[in-house]
Amino acid sequence: MPSRIPAVLWAQWRILWNLRLARGSGGRLVGLALVVVWYGLWTALAASTAVVLADPARREAMGAALPWALLLVFGYWQLTPVFTASLGASLNLTKVLIYPIPERQLFALEVLLRVTTGVEMLLVLGGITLGLLLNPAVPGATVLVAVTVFALLNLLLAAGTRSLLERLVAHKRMREALVFLLVLAVALPQVLAHTGLPRFFASWLAHSPAGLWPWTAAGRVALGASTAADWAVLGAWTLAAYLFGRWQFSRTLRVDAAAAGSAPRPVPRAGAWTDRLYRLPVRLLPDPLAALVEKELRSLFRTPRFRLVFLMGFTFGFLIWVPLWRTESFIFRRAAEDFAVLVSVYALLLLSEVVFWNVFGFDRAAAQLYYSAPARLRTVLAAKNLAAAVVVVLEATMITAACLLLRMPVTAGKILEAYAVLLILSLFLTAAGNLSSLYWARPVDPDHSWGRTSRGRSHALMVLVFPLLSLPVLLAYVARHVFQSQLVFLGGLAVATALGALCYRLALGAAAGLAERQREDLLAVLTAGAGPLA
Amino acid sequence: MSERPAIAVRDLRKVYGEKAAVDGLTLSVPRGCFFGFLGPNGAGKTTTIRMLLGLAAPTAGEIEMLGLPMPEQALAIKRRIGVVPEESVLFDRLTGAEHLEFAGRMYGLERRVAAVRAGELLGLFELNGQPKKLIADYSKGMRKRLSMAAALIHRPELLLLDEPFEGVDAVGARMMKDLLLDQVRQGVTVFLTSHVMEVVERLCDRVAIIHQGRLVMEGATAELRSGTETLEDAFVRLVGGERSLEKLDWL
């Protein structure tokens, strides 16, 4: 049976061509420049490595350093893509499974695609290979074998890990829990830097025989200083990685997404506190505004992406800032007073991705309804903004509760300050977000717990705009510092509030007008693309 | 071997959590038959098709397609069948011609042959007006027509079609129906699900009705109707859909 691999790769090439190259775009040049810089840096590192390893005088030092270098390569290849939530290209199994393609070919494709998560490491391994080949003190043949087998091991293991993760995340609750843990794990190095390695782990690392690790065996083989045991270890790890990869891929191939997603979503019973929260707008606002706010709140709290950032706001924020607060650094000791404000603003930054910047893309399924319902788009936007305000107040409340639980040095005044700052910042963010949601609308699957909700260009813009929008509030803080007066600070906040309200009012009108004028473009843009490689 | 039915299903069962989506389904589709597979929403039609395709593993039961056991002979079966699934399996960033060529190559056709057939199918399905148009820009009806073209590119012996006319305009649907009838005349078996009873009544030789995962009726289309009863009347009667229209005061 002829291989189907070329057909899949050809289709992917055509998709990339149609998407990136066949249509003109100014952003493509910026993207290309970033790619060149990124891989240029890795190429420079690879070249430096080659120069260092080519020196015969460093033969002794290499014996100690090479396994560590290979360990770093291994760690980057296996873990970094998981932590950065970028698992690279992968087969879109749901779309190719209808064709008669053998499982072994699918697996071979999947292993090949793992290269996309470790191109940087292939460059580094290339540098290592070149350096060792140029080194007269190192036998060339074993270098090629060691590096090739080590790369293969990484590819096979990455294929297995990815398949395992893909299957786990098919379960909604598991997906959220896993993504949350992965996100928390990003803060692990910082926490470990302050708390040290757990004792049992340090002891285990110290006492485990180094020769049993693949990076050690690969290092020795590469340097031509190997024993039969090193070859056996490297071979055994590669075989184990193959079996693991094939096993996991095979299981993922057979997973039934419908079955995985069949667990009924819990719906709050009438009278539950969440249901009372959703019903709150009805008590305070007229319809259709109240109905829209209620719909927004219900939708948001049932959306995995939102739940993740909401949860991160008062957990991840603490993981990031608490170790800094506990340092002896003068700056951070001073910042302890403003801890609640600091964490709240950080949480707002996280939340802004889903409740401010791309509100129509995040709610794409309802976009058509908004245009066909007899409600003005100004009302729709206002409802989304009010729901965002409710969310922000809830987040601030959770942060306050967490501060009190952790016995942080926060006073009632500072808590009120956090609420005030958040609400003022929200005014500016909603003003900017209402416009960006229309100018840079992007379809988003809110069931995806990870991945950005905005295009790279607009995402970068948001990061730049956030400090700018915070400027009026920042100036109030500067004024307090300069004049050493709480009254001046409150005055500054009042001015910021007035300015924010004015910006909001103007932006809401402009956004509502824009939404009316660009309805066709907006609805057209809220459609997704797909390919054989996801 | 050729006497064996195109599809034979015995005691097929699929359970999701505590719910049986398909519950002891036994079915036989003769070769060269235009077979309608009907049922209300959530009856288990799509789940059955997913199991026939090997995309979902049955909890229990046996499946035989074109005389070969599924999933043991999944590859050999897939080479001989064409599929229009309910969910889109099209690649949005390809053009129609590129997708058809891809599908042809995936079914084992030589690249040149796949490209020629792709062009011819695009013409037949009237999708060749804008050759550079991406599938992302296709309407729902165009997508369905392209799916049908992709299902036909390798001359399959059996077609599994899940709601193939959904969103297709009257002219396109008429062409597709005529094409399918012609395929059946050539000996191809068609297994079709549709909610449009008139379509099934006009096209299908045999009909099976599934309700809550169970087969409630199977037979020749003419047999299912009794007297002046239409297929729709029979369907509503069999799936217990004769809900009383209790008047709402405000309606």
Image: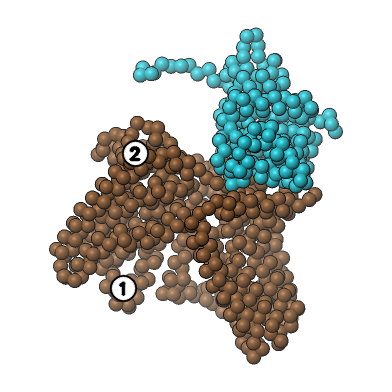
Chain colours: A brown, B cyan
Is residue B34 toward the left or the right of residue B212 in the image? Answer: right
Vertical side of B178 occupied by A212: above or below: below
For image coordinates 28% across by 56% down, the residue present is A425
Is A510 or B193 nearer to us in this picture?
A: A510
For image coordinates 70% across by 29% down, the residue present is B191
Vertical side of A49 occupied by B102: above or below: above
Vertical side of A496 occupied by A41: above or below: below
Estimate the x, y position of residue A113 in percent, counting from the top left.
64, 59
For image coordinates 57% across by 76% down, the residue present is A45
Is residue B180 toward the left or the right of residue A278 in the image? Answer: right
Q: Which residue is mark 2?
A: A377
Vertical side of A175 occupied by A373: above or below: above
Query: Which three-letter amino acid code belongs to the residue tagged 1?
Result: Phe
For image coordinates 73% across by 50% down, the residue present is A4
Chain letter of the residue beneath label 2 in the structure image = A
Closer to the eye: label 1 or 2: 2
The circle drawn on residue A304 is none
Estimate the x, y position of residue A350 in percent, counting from the top left.
39, 57
Earlier along the polypeptide chain: callout 1 or callout 2?
1
Image quarter where the N terminus of chain B lies is top right
| Residue A40 visible in the displayed image | yes
Q: Which residue is mark 1?
A: A332
Residue A249, image quadrant: bottom right
Query: Which three-letter amino acid code belongs to the residue tagged 2?
Result: Leu
